[in-house]
Amino acid sequence: MIDLNALVLEADDPSSPEVRLLKSEPHRFDTDLEAFEHLLVAAALKGASDINISADLRIRVQIHGEQKFATRRPLLLPEAQSMLAHLWSANDAMSLVSAGRALDFSYEKKVDRRRAQRFRVNAVGEQRHGTNGVQITLRVLPDTTPTLDDVGLEAELRDKLEPTSGIIVVAGATGHGKSTTMAAMTRCHLENAPHSRKIVDLQAPIEYTFRDIDTDAADTPSFISQSEVGIGRNIPSFAEGIRAAMRRAPAIINVGESRDRESMEACIEACLTGHLVNTTTHAGSIAEALRRMAFLFPPEEQAARSFDLMTSLNLIIWQRLVKRADGKGRVALREYMVFDERLRARFLERPILEWVGLVDDIFAEAVWDETILARSKAHSLELLAKQGSIVGQN
């Protein structure tokens, strides 16, 4: 158990990059892993989104998008290695990283009898001063599932989350709330008693457990089955997980990330066989997301696969988290495009290389044509500024 009274959460000087998380920093974290666990929980309670650990550097935490120091001295390599072994729950973690493996997994620390704090962990080898080391990033995971109101999903999109089949994509950069938005969408499905569904959730690693959504107690027949993707986990790859899911009769398949040809191909296959697929992808805009998904396939397949992709797409949401005007956290800046038969036909008439220009045309038309459900990031930025949510060109 974590002694919450041992954590220091005093208000620091806002101008200082320092965030003290422990009353007295231990001499060695590799011999005092309890202090390491205290630091992790303290960072979560302090409002950190990420904790960054590297040998020869002080531990950093990211709060509202800014890096701050969490310790007073740099870590030694044995300390970083012990931390990784502790998180991985095995002593082979460093040897796997040294062999070129990137580790993605989840870690949970029991705080007290009623509460546990979860983290998404990424560990990858790095070179520092000519020595092989490891860089560990822990993403702090909330213990409650967000609602659509919590993520501020636009009202005009909410009734577009319930198609019987097709693909809904949430795009954006790492750390900008894609998984959180998808979790809110999943909660919406789980709590929809009149339209009950079985959901298969594939994540690498599992971030939201949906433990707080007790569908049995609420007499809601919807339920979720979660599998963690990765070597040594429940399913070795997203593609295999999707194809296994199709044999389990789900209505919805959540795919944590469509990162390669195999996973995108499986997503399309699932849609064409009558499933709704919710997924995420890394992209800087809707136009870039469309190009990236189409170019996952080799040139000789792109024409056929872009047809399948476009006929499957229901909705793409791109988002980036920006600072609130009041300084209290961040708000999602979004652009979105809802695909109906008219829009799909326009894309299918153009080669993939012309899709970027077409996206811009559709955004411009949507300003005056209410039948087109689309909004550019520039338009959303303007609306957020008018609402007072953000200041200027955030």
Image (cartoon, rainbow, N blue to C red):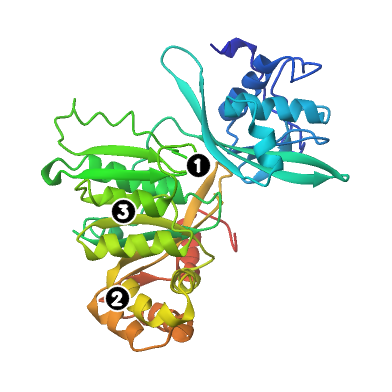
Percent position of residue 17, x then y: 76, 37
Asked whether the viewer can see residue 9, the reply is no
Asked whether the viewer can see residue 174, the reply is yes
Q: Is residue 282 left or right of residue 34?
A: left
Residue under the point 22% across and 45% down: 248
Question: Eyeballing the image, is 11 above or below 201?
Answer: above
Residue under the point 41% across and 51% down: 238
**Residue 317 versus residue 56: which sits nearer the camera?**
56
On-image quarter of the C terminus: bottom right
Q: Tell me how far mark 3 sits from mark 1, CA to CA.
A: 17 Å
The residue identified by callout 2 is 372
The residue identified by callout 3 is 243
Q: Tell me how far mark 3 sits from mark 2, CA to CA.
A: 34 Å
Q: Are marks 2 and 1 in contact (CB under 8 Å)?
A: no
**Residue 77 versus residue 138: which sits nearer the camera?**
77
Q: Secondary structure at mark 3?
A: helix
Percent position of residue 165, x then y: 22, 61
Q: Amino acid at mark 3?
A: Arg
The mark closer to the camera, 3 or 2, is 3
> Given the current orientation, which residue lies at the most extreme left position?
194
Residue under the point 38% across and 33% down: 209
Q: Is residue 132 left or right of residue 365?
A: right
Question: Eyeballing the image, is 102 above or below 168?
Answer: above
Question: Eyeballing the image, is 339 above or below 97?
Answer: below
Instruction: Answer with the quarter of the image where residue 313 lies.
Output: bottom left
Q: Earlier in the sequence, mark 3 or mark 1?
A: 1
Q: Secondary structure at mark 2?
A: loop
The residue identified by callout 1 is 231
Q: Is residue 186 left or right of residue 53?
A: left
Percent position of residue 308, x then y: 31, 74
Q: Amino acid at mark 2?
A: Ile
Circle number at residue 377: none
